[in-house]
Each structure stands twice: as structure tokens, then as C-alpha cells.
Image (spheres, rainbow, N blue to C red):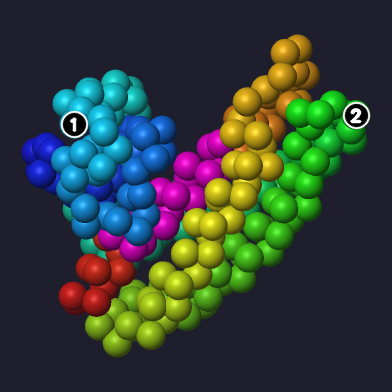
Amino acid sequence: MELNGKSTLGEWASTSPGASAVFIKNSFDFCYKGSQSLEESCKAKGVAVEKVIEQIKEYSKGKDLLTWNSLELEQMIDKILERFHHKHRQDLTILIPLARKVESAHMDNKYSPQGLAFFLEKLLFELESHMKKEEQILFPLIKSGQGQMSLGPINMMIYEHVGHGENLAQLKALAKNYKLPENACESWVTLYQGVSTLEREIMEHIAIENNVLFPKALNG
């Protein structure tokens, strides 16, 4: 599919590997407004659509291209489990102790991300609860061919996605918008890189489910 300004944010996010990073950079809500066209989003933010498309092309260079729309439901779920569920768990088990280390070592620095480790623990708890519901209830239902019967569980997941989106805003605030002080140690740099990646991947996770998986499951 040839994407352009008329294409929706959901279509861009599900077919172009660089789109999500560009959307986050430009504060486009591709998680919950995936049906909005790129042109509409650019107009609302006062940026040129041609510039954003060029940024997406640049970010996409050399990246693995996964066209989510082309996958069968079972394949899509397996990829979500691999790329997001497994990855979120893996990343958070590394980031939580790293955040504790940075907070402890730089306790007296006014730029220190105090409270970040505790919040990452909270995020892991909430994500774990959410992902287990998908793994134990929703995904098996869809894989068994009963996706059209899954409106209730899907609505619950979408509702919880809103809470995850609010968490990401607080996460970014605790990480000082990923702005590092001068002479930041290697652990601090690694922490902010990791948290930034986690934010992007959770947003991608939400966008793929809201805009691709759930509609496809409900439509059979």
C-alpha cells in the first residue's frame, strides 16, 4: 500500500517502521486517534505533511519492515507477544534496578529522576496484569476463531490502554523528558535511552492492537 497524507496514522504506524518515532517526536496521538489522517494531524500541530513524510522515510532507513496489516490474526498475536509482551518484561527487569542505581548515586543532583524506579515497578505491575488478560483470555479467544465474540474483552483492553497512555506521560515527566545533565554517567545515559525506547514500544503496542488487531478480530 502506497502511503500518503490521506493515509491514517494507524496505517502509517502499522506499515512503516519509522512512523511511530516521528509521531512521538511531533506529539501525534497515533494510539487513540489512529483513524485520523496524517494531513489532519499535521494541520492540527502546524507542521508540513511533506516534512513529516520525509522524516518517516529517514527514520525507516535500514529498519526491519513489518507490515502488520498483512499478517493473519494468529501471526499478528505471535508477533505482539514476541515484540511487545516479552520485550516489555525483559526491558523493565533491567530498567528498574538501573533506575534505583542512578537515583541512589545522584541523590543530591537536582536533575536526578527521583521516583522513577518506583514508578517503573508500578508500570510493570499494571502491564503484567494487562498482558496476562490478553494472553490468557483475549488472544486464545481470537486464535480460536471467536474474535467476533470478543467485543467485551477488547473494550476492557482499550479502556486499560488509556491508563497506560497516562502512565507514559508521567514516566516521561519523571525522566525529565530524557534531558541529561552535563557529564551524566553512563548508567544515567543508558537509563534514559532504555526508558525512551520503552515509551515508544508501549505506544506502538497500543497502536497496533487498537488500530489493527482489534478491528481485524471483530470483523472476522
Residue 94 point in image, percent of width and height: 71, 42
Please say whether residue 198 is one of the residues in the magenta stretch: yes
Q: Amino acid at mark 1?
A: Val
Q: Which residue is mark 2?
A: 108
Image: 69 above or below 17: below
Specify whether 43 is left or right of 135: left
- Could you say which disc has been placed on residue 117 in the image? none
Residue at left offset 34%, top offset 43%: 28
132 relative to 183, above or below: below
- x then y, percent, for residue 119: 72, 53
Please give left or right for residue 34 compared with residue 179 in the image: left
| Residue under the image location 37 percent in, 34 percent down | 26
Q: Which SS does the magenta portion mostly show?
A: helix
Residue drawn at the location 61% of the way across and 30% of the way down: 178
**Residue 193 found in image quarter:** top right
Q: SS for tag 1? A: helix
Q: In front here: 41 or 189?
A: 41
* Residue 48 showing in the rendered view: yes
Residue drawn at the location 33% of the way across and 76% of the way down? 142
| Circle 2: element type | loop
Front-most of residues 113 and 189 = 113
The segment highlighted magenta reads 196-211
